[in-house]
Amino acid sequence: MDLEGIARRLYPNIEEIRKKIIEEVEFYKGKDYQLKEQLTDALIEEVKKSIIASKIEPLLSYPVTGLKAGEAGLGSRGKGDHIIHEKILSLSGLNKFEDARVNKNVVVSIDGIHSRLAYFPFLAGFHATRAALRDVMVKGAEPIGVLVDIHLSDDSDLGMLLDFEAGVMTVTEFLGIPILAGSTLRIGGDLVIGERISGGIGAVGLLKRVFFSRDKIEEGDYIVMTEGNGGGTITTTAIYNGFYDVVKETLSLVDLVTCRVISEESIVNKVHSATDITNGGIRATAYELPENFGIELEKEVFISLINPKVYEMLNSLGIDPLGLSIDSIAIFTKEPEVILKKLAESGIRAGIIGRIVRADKGKLVDERGNRLEMGFRESPYTPIKKIIGNKTSYSEELIRQRLNEALKLVKEKKENVLKTLKAS
């Protein structure tokens, strides 16, 4: 519970703030919590001063778009999130989608904890670490370590911290790499009460031979995909829908082994590019290709490569497997049989799920030419996500327009601060 957020939302109704904050504090801390009155008074004073500050000092304000993150699709790995990330990439000057970035042979990536795994710290740590390392390794880098950023709410049990770290270290010890650095904090200091954890894992690698950039994908490339056992998304689906036996199916690191195999000297020159089928599924993967290209998908082959227990769960729940993370590795090549043979030698199940075509046929089409469009959000995979649905009241045009207006303002702020820094 974000006490500061409550106070800011109710300000300047001081009595209403006092009543609501004390109610929330008592819920988590107990009615006998001795500091509740003092804490509430101090919070009201802090919020009052911070609101005044943001009104008189432009540096402390942000451009208000009127777009709420959830309604705009942020983090939901569909069209809405795609538009938002286009703008982030534009601001950063990167412009193109990529799993990880390379600079001076150093490849880095970062992945956040799946928010619905906050009460399952070991799994949250395991899957976030696996995802961050996979993003580095799928680009052709050899991992050299990870960075851990873990935040606990005020009432989180410290056992959650240790359980999370154990999840992280299960992956790092498997690969034989260290934790290089970390940060352990509370969410919002004293002002977020409750037991939720959040944070992320950063991964660092050194480029071995070739960076498997999306720019190297060519028309006519075949797409070899490995078996998908699922990760954080499938784990979440299993827990919140009661398919508990599926959770263990996701505790697999065959995807990381695959990345090492395709980076070996004997095969690396056969690989044009590689990526993972994660957030948003194969639908999102198609939209992250270079602008001119799309995917002609062999849907039945794709489905056959999903872990049988995972697919059985998705099928029984009516969840579209094309629109969510299955944690497979997709390899783009002109010589698929060579890749398949090499993977088979390592005991990795894989198949050819399609090929690269011109985008004028659609970013994602099936073998009959039917377009398989990306939804506004990824496939709804928990009961709550099904209630929220896959639509929004915002138009794509509105999202783009408001974000463009905000981009202009934040760029001006950045340039003004830079001028000040350079002047000093």
Image (spheres, rainbow, N blue to C red):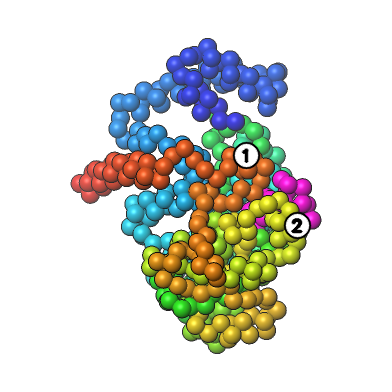
Residue that mark 2 sits on:
246
Magenta stretch bounds: 231-246
**2 and 1 marks in contact (CB < 8 Å):** no
Secondary structure beneath disc 1? helix
- The vertical placement of 239 against 103, above or below, is above
Left or right: 303 in relation to 182: right
Q: Where's residue 187, x and y in %?
A: 56, 38
**Amino acid found under the numbered disc labelled 1:** Ile
| Closer-to-camera residue (349/148) | 349
Q: Residue at x 68, y 75 (%)?
A: 349
Q: Where's residue 30, x and y in %?
A: 70, 22
Using the image, tell me which numbered label, if any, was put on residue 162: none
Queried whether the magenta region covers residue 255, the answer comes back as: no
**Mark 2, other Cα within 10 Å: few <14 / some 14–19 / many ≥20:** many
Residue that mark 1 sits on:
387
Q: Where's residue 144, x and y in %?
A: 55, 68
Q: In the rendered image, which quarter is residue 168 located in?
A: bottom right
